[in-house]
Amino acid sequence: MGAQETASGDHVRVRWLAPQQMGASAETLGFYFEVDPGWHVYWRNAGDSGAAPRFDISGNGDVGKILWPYPERLPIEHLTNLGYAGNVAYLFDVTARMETLELAVNLEWLVCKVDCIPGFGSLTLSRPAGGGNSGSESRWNQDDLTLRNHFLARVPQPSGQSPWQVERLTRRGDLLRLSLRNTSGRHRDGQPSVFPLDGELLQASQPTLEIDGDRVHFTFSKVPGAPAAEATGFVVVDEGSAWQFDAIPIVAAPVVTAVLEEETQSFWLLVLAAFAGGVILNLMPCVFPVLSIKLFGLIDQGSGSRVKEGLLYSAGVLATFAILGGLLMVLRAGGAAVGWGFQLQSPSVVLGLIVLFWLMALSFSGVFEFGHRLMLVAGHSRGGSFVTGVLAVFVAAPCTGPFMGAALGAAAVMPAVYAMVIFLGLGAGLAAPFLLLCASPALLHRLPKPGPWMDRVRQLLAFPLYATVIWLLWVLGRMLGDTGWVIGTVLMLGLGFALWIGTSFSGSRRAKFAGYVMALLVLFTGFGTLSVPQRDALQGSPELLSGWQPFDAAAIAQARAENRAVFIDYTAAWCITCQVNKKLVLDTAPVQNMFHENDVLLIRADWTNQDSEITAALAELGRNSVPVYAWYAPGASTPELLPQILQERMIAALFE
């Protein structure tokens, strides 16, 4: 192989940066580009125009990837290029496998000022090598070694060595916001420069810089028409050193977060939204049974204590919201992906509610005299008012009413203090109507006087509780399959029999004891048989086979890449609003026909059980509760979120 160690083109001369003799271990060599003043060559991401040089290397050595020294921004007219104004060395690692290292390379480059000139060349290299002599070292010309080391110092190092660490990379419309935090513990002069690795995703122009204490935020603009990406990388440069961050996950910036950044006043709008959502929760069917219980207590109470009852009820609501909010914050800090209603993703909690509502319904129907104690717990005593508030929050979890979605989505990503304020705002809204009823004599006067009719009403209100039990049995069945029904109904049968034993033998302590023992055995056995099947086991349900597909991120991405419309129904069996929308709108023949005629991919993301993939998808939409309806029009880069209460005309409007 004849040695041709230089090449040249217009405004460029290229030569090797290589030692006179190779050592036994890996060595870093390079191609040194000497560029005329005023002209430049390019980095791996060339920016708005230009092209990175190409290296086709062959030979008898083990050759590594090209090592790109960090670039600089080169404004040309209204464009920004990324490259090198002046000389530069493109480096690579090589290990000689034989006594003589033989390399050949075909080069292509583009050198630009305002106009650009392509260049081509071939170089060969022949150097004696250390071979198997482990003690041999490379022998360099000192000037070349200095040049090599100068540019080697500009090659980005692994991100773990950087004093700047990525906190998050968020997407908001056509903008990507990269947040870095200084973890060095010392003040650093100036701010780092950041260069995107993917020129097809982000524009090369200088990003907008914001400084927040030891954090800096860079906002980049997407290349128009660039497809959505799940991750991307950057090179961060600071004080002459550089680090490379690869495949940083991109998460959607919740709209509410963006609003908060623009004006603090919007935070209080979120709190108001949470309050309004809490008020509306009182109208949801999942809350009604508990409010019906409390209604007895309110009617039968003397007026003097009603305000205290209302305050105790409100305290129970607020305390429970505070505990749930605190638990969410703790789980979030631990990296868990959870959302509103997460407690109902536990079969044990659902089964516990079945037991509770079953006993309450039997008591309301007069089957056994748990009623006095129940009323003490749920209605008459002050401690019972507090417990009623707790219960109201717990059973309200399956419902997400208007205004709640955005507020809860914001709470999922906001600092803990702000998130807690939103949770308490929601609780205040839930408690407000009842507290108002207790405090307002005018409203109280409109209530009917206590009398025998209350027994009839109590018996009537047992039926919503029976309905709630049926609904919870269905939820348990969705979680566990057919065994869920069996476990729930057998548990109810066993409890009924235990109650019959305990109450049928008047005055018998042995009978009561036997009833208690049997009830405990039934509960222990019922809860001990719970287990959650894998998601795949539930994907053959009839509704998923009727046109709706289970959640599949790859299928969604493929459909969108093919410019096919996608409609995603984020739902859960315990979400009553979801089920109402499903029966009244989504699964009706007219709506299904509209989807079919427009070739829409229908995705039903079932969040009945905990699913980290679906939770992450909700988080990208800025939500942590269901229902959520995401509509991707053909070719759209971002989804349109539909209201939580659906109507057929809203679906029809998607195709107009």
Image (cartoon, rainbow, N blue to C red):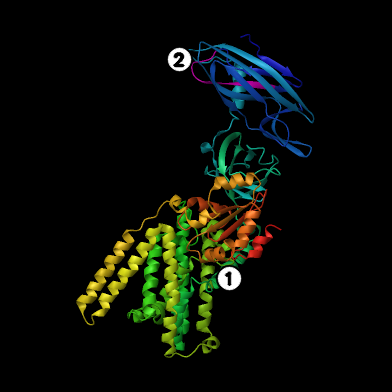
| Mark 2 element type | loop
Q: Position of residue 197 (x, y in %)?
A: 62, 37
The quadrant in which residue 585 appears is: bottom right
User: Can residue 184 be seen in this snapshot?
Assistant: yes
In this view, 361 is above or below 342: below
The quadrant in which residue 459 appears is: bottom left
User: Can residue 260 be seen in this snapshot?
Assistant: no
Mark 1 belongs to which amino acid? Ala
Placement of the C terminus among the 4 image quadrants: bottom right
Q: Which residue is mark 2?
A: 135
Mark 2 belongs to which amino acid? Gly
In the image, the segment drawn in magenta is 21-33
Going from the N terminus, do you reach mark 1 or mark 2 first?
Answer: 2
- Residue at 69% x, 18% y: name it: 121
| Count of picture labels | 2
Asked whether 339 falls inside the magenta stretch, the response is no
- Residue at 26% x, 79% y: name it: 504
Q: Which residue is mark 1?
A: 276
Foreground residue among 423 and 548: 548
Q: Position of residue 632 (x, y in %)?
A: 64, 52
